[in-house]
Amino acid sequence: MTPEEITRKLGEVGLVNPLQSLAVGAIAYAGAFLMAIVAVVLSVVAIVVTGLGNPVDSALESVDMDQAEAGSGVASLLRLPFQLVAMATFGSFDVDGTIEGVSFGAGLRILPFGITLVMVLLAFYGGRFVQKRQRAGLLGIWTTSVLTGFGVALFTVLSAFILAERVPAEAGASISLHAAGFDTFFGAFALITLSLALGRLTVRARRSWWPLVADLPAAFKLAVSHALIVTVLGLCGVTIVSTIQALIDGETPPMIYVLLLLPLIGGHVLSFVTGLDMLSAATANIDGAGALSYLMDGMNGTERATMFSLPWYTWLGGLLLGGLALLLASLLWQHQRRIVPHHVVSLGVSWIALPAAYFLGGLVLLVLSQASVAARLSGGGFFFGDMRIGASVGLAAWTPLLAMMAGVIVELLSRFVAPFLTPFLPSAALSWFRRPLAPAAAGVTSGAVGAAGASSAAGPAGSGPLTYSAPLAGAAPDGGFSLAPSAQGIPTDINADGVVEAGTVSAQHAGQAQAHEAVPTSADGTAAAGRYATVPIGATAGALSFAGAAGAAGAAGAAGAGGAGGAAGADGSTAEPGAAGNSTGKITAAAASLSPRTRKLVLAGAVVVGAGIVLVIGLIVTFVVLSNTVFSPEKRVEAYLGAVQAGDAEQALEIAAPNVPTAQQALLTNDIAGAAENRISDFEIVGSEESGSKSATVTAKVTQDGVTTTRTYRVDRSGRTAVVFPDWTMAETEYATLALVIPDGAATLLVNGQEVAVSDLDTSEGYYAPAAVLPGQYTVTLPESSELVAAVESVAYVSADPDDWYELYAAPGYSLSESGMEEVQTQVDALLDECATSTEESPDGCPFRAYAYGVVEDSGSWTIDSYPTVEVEESDEGWYFGSSSSAGAATYSYQKEGWGSDDEPTDETDESSFSVSGTVTVGEDGTVAVEFDDGWW
């Protein structure tokens, strides 16, 4: 068998030469590789812009290696694109090894979407290009696609493994970093195989049932368009706002880095912007095992952030963008949409196409948003053991459900709102969205039957070749064309008489075949069995005809039954009732007219439905806005800090009471807190992070006396207020504690000029009483009571920073006035005079004594020669007086017994100097009392 015969035999079963498909696979890989180079160059530019210098040198210096050991930086950069292409096919950039008995491994998984997109698009459009020239059957398409996918996958894995980045280790060994693996192989195989096969399948003639499901590919295209609209508009808004802010602050606009890194993070930008705008959440998860779990205490767990975690103007703009995108998507979906009338499959598909496409699009967003890093270490000895750490970011798992809801909303808007808006829009605003492989409008072609309806001239019905007529709406300028498949399903050309000839279609007709969806008909003018015509989705029954019963309608037209609404053309063409024939045999669709009453009812219903949708959307937006502003946890903290700033302690207590006994809340009154100086002067809520739906942590910056402090407050959800809105309650809030030192005998304190009874304070600690206070300056003193004493105030500054709350105390007291000092001296002299009345040589409780022996009983007497001058000092335990710098003098006169019984007593004297010391007590009434200390002086 000759090669030509082999080729012909293989062609009969649809098999073709795979070389062209393999070339497409090579081009797809080459395009992805070039995109990877672009990504590397742009990443280097981004690093240079940030001023980090040469990343290769920095990395090598961090591990104490020079470039000679690890290869030049240029070589590393040349190897990196191969790894990026492997990662673009769902590969993970991994490193594994063992050094001195310690096994370790690490992996980075991130999808450089720009590279993946280039590879997929080149494979898809390359498949279309090849199919237009080879016309392979299904077997040939899948065979060549699988073969090409296998080849590209094998090359991707081998190139990533062979060109791995090798880092020298101990004893001449090296560690390899690469993205080669089974995930890379199967990822590349699936991407290339499916993209190439899908591209080739889109060029093939569609099946007869295609009009029934034509909404499905259009729905996927709309889902992609919707995501792109949201992402582009969102990025434009963020770029404008952030750039203006950065220029005002004199900083580099941050979006420069995002734009430079788009080839690498484009998928994440697309997924997060679209997902957050659909009210999904971004999640971050981190966990560890082994010693790392202990060291990471407090870091394990999952954190979530929604669009409402951003500043209010950001999420409000996001809500407006989301609503606008939904409306625009509905207008695009309604534009030139056609379905097969009165068919349950077509009707069902028309309703489920968008939700299904959006749901699958949500799954794609989940995949694109994922980025993870993991590391492990084992065999590190008793302390380390086996350790593992992993971190990942992505969208929340419920994103596909939210996307499906968006699809449902778009479908409803396209049916009940968009028809009333479309007439006010220029056609160019919507015509850019073209439905892929759209089905044809209902229509018929000129047949081979004459005006007499002599169908026998063309043989039995359906015996002639199939022809395809251009749709009524949007027909080609030349008036249409006719094509029909050959026995192998390959389109054929048309002869000069308008009859389909066997063979291959010309390039011109092939292009027309893709540009127009034709309704196949037989040579007698009737529709081919099993073929379906379509009508606009808003058309009523009878608006356009089903081109299927032409024979019966033609007979009725030939008999003159035009009064029924049908008319036969001069060449035998026919139409259903409601369509008019013309002299050329073409059928023109007559739009169904509505009565004025029906039109009003439809308009009123549409207005009610539209108003209901607007009302529901408005209520949802209002609920979200109020829940995140007026009834948000941030507002609760704002109310508390506002009360603290205003010195409204009672309001602050109502919002967040301290967890202390009532006696320790005695200073939390409006009179005391409101009179405090140096209260907080300003505050700003800078962040809020919800922990599930029951609690949130609010971060605020508080300014006091020119110093800014960052505080965090926990707020718990305690139910609902106003029926539907969340009610938030501040959890136990930490208050500063001021220790009040209470002098002996004091019954009243003055705090910021306000009297506070000591009996109202918590004196269980002894000489001081703890009291909760708000930030500010507190002046504590004692009441003025007499001219003998003057109250001494104590000032305590309570900072808003808890780190400064150590040794907070106030110790009010009294100081003796000049009169008080004189009173102390007078009372000391009086006590000495009283001591001098004693006849004892050592009077009890007195500061002086005599060294005398044999004193005749009751013969002694004391004389104060000079009084000591006392000084008064204050200590932590009260007032003390002493005379260490000015002693007194006293003389003891007595009779001394003789040595014998007959001896007369002799008069003796003993002079001594003495000092005094003791305590001074100031009573509540301002009186002063002194008392000598016990002991020796």
Image (cartoon, helix red, strand yellow):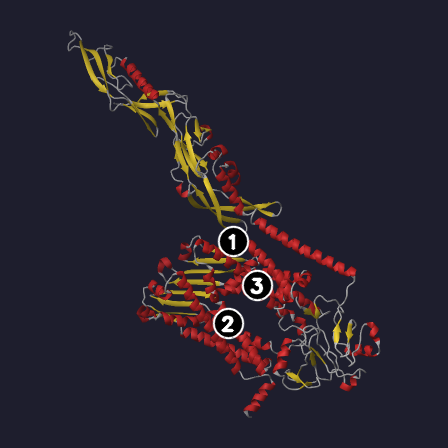
- x, y percent for residue 428: 63, 67
Please say if 664 is above or below 603. above
Q: Nearer the viewer, mark 3 or mark 2?
A: 3
- Is residue 453 visible in the rendered structure shown here? yes
Q: Nearer the observer, disc 1 or disc 3?
A: 3
Callout 3 secondary element: helix
Which mark is first along the chain, 3 or 1?
Answer: 3
Q: Are marks 1 and 3 in contact (CB under 8 Å)?
A: no
Q: Circle 1 sits in a helix, a strand or a loop, which is it?
A: loop
- Residue beneath label 2, please? 118
Q: Looking at the image, which is closer to me, 2 or 30?
A: 30
Q: CA distance from mark 2 to mark 1?
A: 33 Å
> Which residue is under mark 1?
310
Q: Earlier in the sequence, mark 2 or mark 1?
A: 2
Residue 572, given in percent of the width and then of the height, sits at: 78, 80
Locate residue 754 relative to residue 578 in the image: left or right: left
